Amino acid sequence: MLEFYEFITLCALFLVYSFLGWIVEVIFTFFVEGKLVNRGFLVGPLVPIWGTGAILITLGLKPDDSVFSLIISSAFIGTVLEYIVNYVMEKIFKVRWWDYSQFPFNINGRVCLITSCMFGIAGLLVIKVFNPLFIKLFLMINESVFCVLISVLIVLACIDFCVSFNIIQKFKFSVDSVRKDYTEEISKKVRKTLMEKSLWFKRLFKAFPNIKFGLKKK
């Protein structure tokens, strides 16, 4: 039961950080663009890459590590994770979802120094501040109730993932069906056509305004 509880606790942390990541991205987008946007791939208010990064940092780093070590290690973990996710999503859907090419010290436009620094600071806060706080709050909830609640939320998150993945698959097929070549003009036409075709596609464009089509195989 103890091992199951520890697993459920990790699941709870994943959900919390995924939700907090969604909030951070919504607020950031609001200040940059002046409008509220449902960020991320999922229909629900979760951005899994934040939760995944937080769990990797939680499992890989220790609270008694030095501040410098925590920042550098967190930055490395977050940067590698973001690069892999960007690369895999591009290869699967043939679409570049986000691009940091306009920022200095970027690697193939997939990651950049600014976001790496953000990962470093966020990792430090996760280990030193948020994990102890959240775990303390979790312990205040009846163990059985806590396990059932998190299990239900994980199931809902999995359903959301399946539904969202299906939407993105249809999005990919629709992109392929209306795309003619790799020019910027056609990319704009693809965007306009798809936004008129589905409200779900329109949400994806709002969540990823810098999305790029027509990526040639390398």
Image: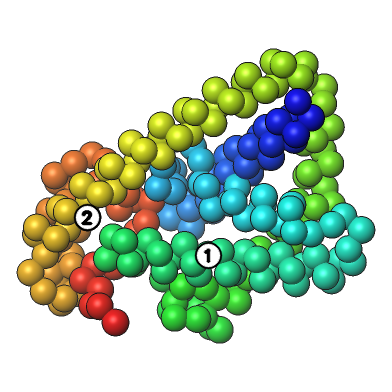
Q: Which residue is pictured at 52% across the width and 47% down the height?
A: 48
At which x and y percent is residue 16? 64, 38
SS at mark 2 in the image:
helix
- Mark 1, Cα crowd under 10 Å, few <14 / some 14-19 / many 20+, is many
Q: Residue at x 33, y 67 (%)?
A: 91
In this rendering, the answer to whether 211 lies above or below 157 is below
Q: Are marks 2 and 1 in contact (CB under 8 Å)?
A: no
Residue type beneath disc 1: Glu
Seen at 74% across and 59% down, the residue is: 60
Residue 205 vs residue 144, the one in the foreground: 144
Distance (Cα) linking label 2 and label 1: 21 Å
- Mark yes or no: residue 158 visible: yes
The colour scheme is rainbow
Q: Is residue 205 left or right of residue 196?
A: right
- Compared with 25, 179 (above or below) is below
User: Label 2 sits on what residue type?
Assistant: Lys
Foreground residue among 13 and 151 = 151
Kind of element beneath mark 1 = helix
Which of the numbered marks, if any, corresponds to residue 173? Answer: none
Provide the residue designation for mark 1.
82
Report the side of 6 relative to 89 (left or right).
right
Tag 2: Cα neighbours inside 10 Å, few (<14), some, or many (≥20)?
some
| Front residue of 72 and 208 | 72
Name the N-terminal-most of marks 2 and 1: 1
Q: Which residue is mark 2?
A: 172
Q: Quadrant of the C terminus?
A: bottom left
Q: Quadrant of the N terminus?
A: top right
Place of residue 98 in the rendered image (x, y in percent of width and height, measured from the top left):
40, 65
- Identify the residue at horizontal 54%, vertical 53% (top origin): 49
